[in-house]
Image: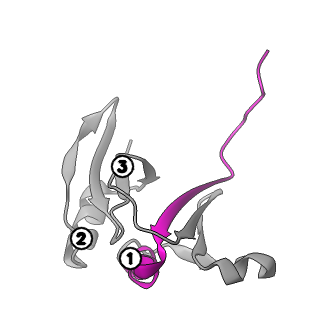
Amino acid sequence: MSLGITGIDHVQMSVPRVLEADCLAFYRNVLGLTEIPKPEELRARGGAWFQVGAAQFHIGVDPEPFPRSKRHVCFLVPDLAEARAAVVAKGAVIEEEGIAEGLHRFFVRDPAGNRIEIGQR
């Protein structure tokens, strides 16, 4: 029996409180995501919400740092070379590049070490 899942409403990444400002600046300024207001009852928790196409990307705040991992979100772009040039121009370091299952992609990390994939099909 299937659950009937039809899509993704949002993805949440966590950042440690001590890196919250740096990470939010990364998503706002380096990746240029469009920030949307968080519900009033959630604002005191910190973090931010962004609209990315039909889905949302949420940044939550944890009290402690955490180890680097391969967990990630993949943001699709219409022009990978242009996106790569834009993030490099803003100081992001490309961690890995390649093609997987027809997805041309590269990875960067936010200031908290979260892995971000940028891809073009």
Which amino acid, by three-letter code, is at mark 2?
A: Ala
Which amino acid, by three-letter code, is at mark 3?
A: Gly
In the image, taking residue 88 as reference, residue 118 lies left or right, namely right
Instruction: Name the residue nearer the viewer: 2 or 84.
Output: 2
Instruction: Name the residue nearer the viewer: 49 or 52.
Output: 49
* Badge 2 vs badge 1, beta-carbon distance below 8 Å: yes
Residue 87 horizontal/vertical position (percent): 27, 70
Q: Earlier in the sequence, mark 3 or mark 1?
A: 1
Which quadrant is home to the N terminus? top right
Element under disc 2? loop
In the image, taking residue 53 as reference, residue 74 lies left or right, namely left
The residues colored magenta run: 1-29
Label 3 vs label 2, nearer the camera? 2
Q: Quadrant of residue 5?
A: top right
Vertical position of residue 16 compared to residue 66: above or below: below
Q: Quadrant of residue 67?
A: bottom left
* Separation of residues labelled 3 and 1 (CA atoms): 18 Å
Q: Earlier in the sequence, mark 2 or mark 1?
A: 1
Q: Residues within 10 Å of mark 2 (few under 14, many from 20)?
A: some
Residue beneath label 1, please? 26
Q: Residues within 10 Å of mark 1 (few under 14, many from 20)?
A: many
Residue 80 in magenta? no
Task: Please say which color scheme the image uses.
Answer: one colour
- Tell me the tag on residue 3: none
Element under disc 1? helix
Which quadrant is home to the C terminus? top left
Residue 9 in magenta? yes
Q: Determine the residue positioned at 73% across, 76% down.
A: 42
* Separation of residues labelled 3 and 2 (CA atoms): 16 Å
Residue beneath label 2, please? 92
Residue beneath label 3, please? 119
